[in-house]
Image (cartoon, rainbow, N blue to C red):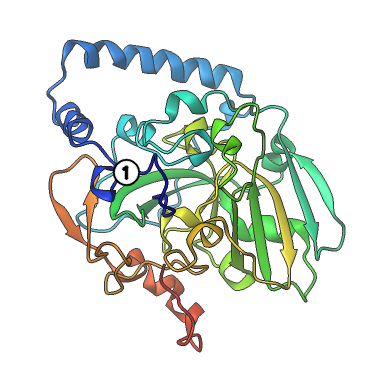
Amino acid sequence: MNIIRRRGWEIPEAQATPENLFLDRRALLGGGLGIAAAMAIPTRARAQRAADAADPSASLYPFKRNEKYQLGAGYDLTDEKLNANYNNFYEFGTSKTIAAPAQALKLRPWTVKIDGMVEKPMEIGFDDLLAKMPHEERLYRFRCVEAWSMTIPWSGFPLAELVKFAKPLGSATYLQMETFLDKAVAPGQRQSWYPWPYTEGLTMVEATNELAFIATGCYGHPLPKQHGAPLRLAVPWKYGFKSVKSITRLTFTDKRPKTYWEGLQASEYGFWANVNPEVSHPRWSQATEQVLGKSERIPTKLFNGYGEYVADLYKGLEKERLWA
């Protein structure tokens, strides 16, 4: 995601990912391991083992893969090391290399508040919530509005199961989700021009679609902090900014939420944010995407290739701005 407001620190879109950094990653994935990179592998492995040891949910992973959800011909899983070190998490900074700063995020205790139009508002600890949900792994494509993409093995549970657990009233038509708010650990949240906390939303029909998924892990481990631990949204037919991270609150409502990026620049980032290669972003084309870890660009697919699951959700909404 790119900052739209013109401020002194803003850089052009073409410079959002430094070329030398991107090429270094490609060389690493292509087998051109230098001494520093080779030494980093056991360091990362030790870091992962340490993270697992500190996470009380780690023993649950890996989850059994649901074979219904496949990447499709021509897609390969993104290398885990690349996936872990190329992230947007504006709470911790505007660069893609926010994995180290994100380690300041404290994951226990972690409480999720469920309120709004529900039978009984509640607060529940993450580990208690996880114990009540069915677990599985799904392979999903991920398409960023910036025109790059990944493929990820998410672990977690269907959002529909969480909706069922929350027991919303029949009059609720939207689900609003919020991330954590803690300026003491998240330096980005000290910037007053951002509309914190990060807020996203889905219609109830979208939230209960079978593709909508709450990710609590990836690559057979609990979620790394830079991915939005301990739980984040994954909606693969939408641009990535819809997938709110580090969720602390779910509010059921009959009013459409005003989302974070709408608050920053509504003319460029709308509520629906469905992937469409034929509708350009105001500042760049969406026709193709850069697959991280590969040199070639590939054509982008309508709904990111998930039209069979979601196209019917938007019938009758032709007058809506369904694309970001």
| Frontmost residue, 189 versus 76 | 189
Q: Is residue 31 above or below residue 265?
A: above
From this viewpoint, is residue 212 visible? yes
Query: Could you say where residue 281 lies in the image, as x and y percent from the top left?
Result: 32, 66
The residue located at (54%, 54%) in the rendering is 213
Tell which of 260 and 303 is nearer to you: 260
Badge 1 is on which residue? Answer: 11
Total count of labels? 1
Up/down of 285 relative to 224, above or below = below
**In this rendering, is residue 89 above or below 27?**
below
Amino acid type at circle 1 is: Ile
Question: Quarter of the image containing the C terminus?
Answer: bottom left
Q: Residue furthest front?
A: 8
Comparing 174 with 62, the one in front is 174
Q: In which quarter of the view is residue 132 placed? A: top right
Residue 259 place in picture, x, y as percent: 58, 60
Q: Is residue 154 left or right of residue 14?
A: right
In the rendered view, tell whether residue 64 sits above or below residue 84: below
Q: Quadrant of residue 240?
A: bottom left
Q: Residue at x 34, y 64 (%)?
A: 304
For the point 67% across and 69% down, the residue is: 174
Residues 37 and 13: in front is 13
Q: Choose top left, top right, bottom left or bottom right for residue 160.
A: bottom right
Secondary structure at badge 1 equals loop
Q: Position of residue 65 (x, y in %)?
A: 44, 46
Label 1 Cα neighbours within 10 Å, binned few <14 / some 14-19 / many ≥20: few
Asked whether the viewer can see residue 222, the reply is: no
